[in-house]
Amino acid sequence: MNFDTLTIINLFKEIDYNFNELVKCLLLSGINGLISSGVVFILLSPLETFFSRITDIKLLELADFNQPLLKRLMLEAPGTYHHSLTVASIAEHAANAINANALLARVGAYYHDIGKLIKPEYFIENQVAIENPHNNISPTMSGLVVISHVKEGVNLAKKNNLDKPIIDLIEQHHGNSLLYSIYQKALEKIEISSETEFRYPGPKPKTKEAAILMISDSCEAAARTLDEPSPSRLKDMVEKIINNKFTDGQLNDAPLTLSDMNKIADSIVETLIGIHHVRIEYEIGKEKNG
């Protein structure tokens, strides 16, 4: 056997050895990947709970409209369900405008009013072809019913094992703001001893997302009351709402700058204009575009 033949044989042996090592490495890598994935899958939920964090994966899971609470909202309180979807769109765009967690803002908005499931007929968005039940009770009782939807929402969220960041948004989305219209009725009937009876219990928003949700919620509700939601009227309305929240101290605990609030206002106005856009009326027989 000459030198060239021995060289070729040794070369093939080395290649065979390296191939076997490669196969072993690939197998071990695959096993390691499976084990790591399993550990992450098992520990992810407990770690989220322990650190009061929520991942995008969990948020996307909660955003599924087949979630039990969202299905209940759609069937039992359709007006609130539609309101929540609209608020979610407004909040998501506003969060993007200031680089906050847009997904958390959107999903939190889906669930922020789940407490209204307890007495949906007491909230105006659900009062279709029925008498307003607040007409038959005192302003004090009206205030208690409306304010209770926050506590009821927190209770429902806990019973359904929603994550703490979502529960915080539910709890903080009204801060300790005043139920102004009901408070005024109470003043007229002289049945009030303290303004605090007509304030939500709080706490005030402590995150950018909670503050955005509070503002978006108020703006969406107010926009529905405008007879002619023109861009200028929407802009004035949004600026007034944000200013009122600011002067009432509702944004004191939220890490928002004045620049953030201006960006939030601009974003909300833009979104509301898109939602309440005024279409041009055309004469019958004329071509319509859009």
Image (cartoon, rainbow, N blue to C red):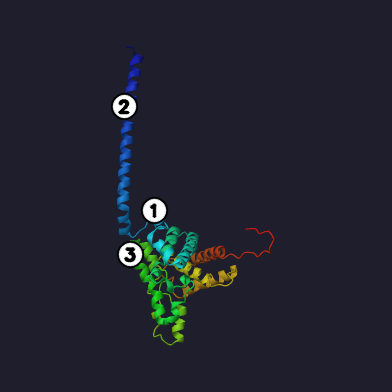
Judge left or right: residue 80 versus residue 161: right
Location of mark 2 (residue): 17
Q: Are marks 3 and 2 in contact (CB under 8 Å)?
A: no
Q: What label does residue 122 carry, if any?
A: none
Q: What label does residue 158 carry, if any?
A: 3
Q: Say above or below: 184 vs 37.
A: below
Q: Amino acid at mark 2?
A: Tyr
Q: What label does residue 57 carry, if any?
A: 1
Query: Residue 87: where, in percent of width, then height?
Result: 48, 65
Q: Is residue 188 visible?
A: yes
Mark 1, secondary structure of its residue: helix
Q: Residue at x 42, y 71 (%)?
A: 120
Judge left or right: residue 159 versus residue 287: left
Q: Of label 3 and label 2, which has the lower sequence position? A: 2
Of labels 3 and 1, the one closer to you: 3
> Callout 3: 10 Å neighbours few (<14), some, many (20+)?
some
Q: Residue at x 30, y 51 (%)?
A: 42
Q: Amino acid at mark 3?
A: Lys
